[in-house]
Amino acid sequence: MSAIRENLQAVRDAIVAAAGAARRTPAAVQLLAVSKTFGADAVLQAVEAGQRAFGENYVQEGVDKIGAVAGARPDVTLEWHFIGPIQSNKTRPIAEHFDWVHTVEREKIAVRLAEQRPAELGALNVCVQVNISGEASKSGVAPDEVAALARAIAALPNLRLRGLMAIPEPADDFDAQRAPFAAVRELFEQLRGEFGKDFDTLSMGMSADLRAAVLEGATIVRVGSAIFGARHYNKG
């Protein structure tokens, strides 16, 4: 059994355990395998192990990988999520190649994605990124600005507003991990009635804080290193 297959099973088991502790069904939590900096071969190993949803942070790397994996496994339908910061000049390849975007924090970016989304691909699923911990170094909108951005996105064609995404400040203490996730969930619940049944997604939690995120209602957890191993960044 490959290391990636074993790691995937361990993460799935962790999701099942966390969902059980939260009295939630494990099927309510989607595992997004974050494959940034790893090649198409690693993604293909995960595909062989049954994984179907992948997250990428870098536009060109992601687009290249999507093409390579599709060429190698045209028989399998995968779901690709863009989860990195978005520059205005990089919106077109995101709109043309990805199924989801988790990191919309400006109306300008949403407008460009809407304009550049090919109609034949259907609506692009979008989450608003919330800077829940107020970190100056983190992307995302302040909690009190989320509703206005969400309304702007919901009014655009070719986009489907799905929910919120957050990357809280890292914390070792379990209660400290849970607190920002609880704040995101409360914000999500405040908005849910306004935006309808499609507003169903809480993208939060990574390798180190998955359990806390699931206990606070995460519907997508973004896990990379626990699946693929330590990353080696060699980008300039």
Image (tube, rainbow, N blue to C red):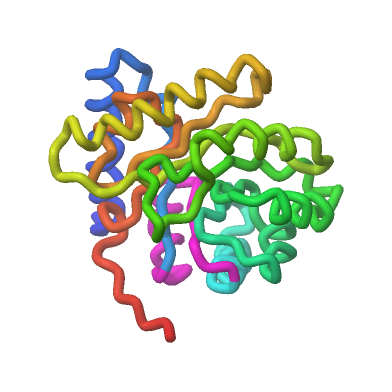
Query: For the point 34% across and 41% down, which residue is it?
Result: 205
Residue at the far left: name it: 173
Q: Is residue 157 above or below residue 189?
A: below
In the image shown, does 8 or 86 lie closer to the viewer? 86
Which quarter of the rendering shows the N terminus? bottom left
Judge left or right: residue 76 versus residue 148: left
Residue 180 in picture, x, y percent from top left: 33, 34
Q: Is residue 114 above or below residue 19?
A: below
Query: For the point 49% across and 36% down, which residue is it?
Result: 143
Residue 86 in picture, x, y percent from top left: 59, 61
Judge left or right: residue 117 versus residue 68: right
Query: For the point 22% across and 26% down, which residue is it?
Result: 17
Residue 98 magenta-highlighted: no
Residue 39 magenta-highlighted: yes
Judge left or right: residue 97 versus residue 233: right
Query: For the point 30% across and 13% down, which residue is it?
Result: 23
Residue 203 in picture, x, y percent from top left: 46, 38
Instruction: Kindly indicate the quadrant of the structure image that contains residue 204.
Output: top left
- Segment colored magenta: 37-59
Residue at the far bottom: name it: 236
Q: Is residue 196 above or below residue 7?
A: above
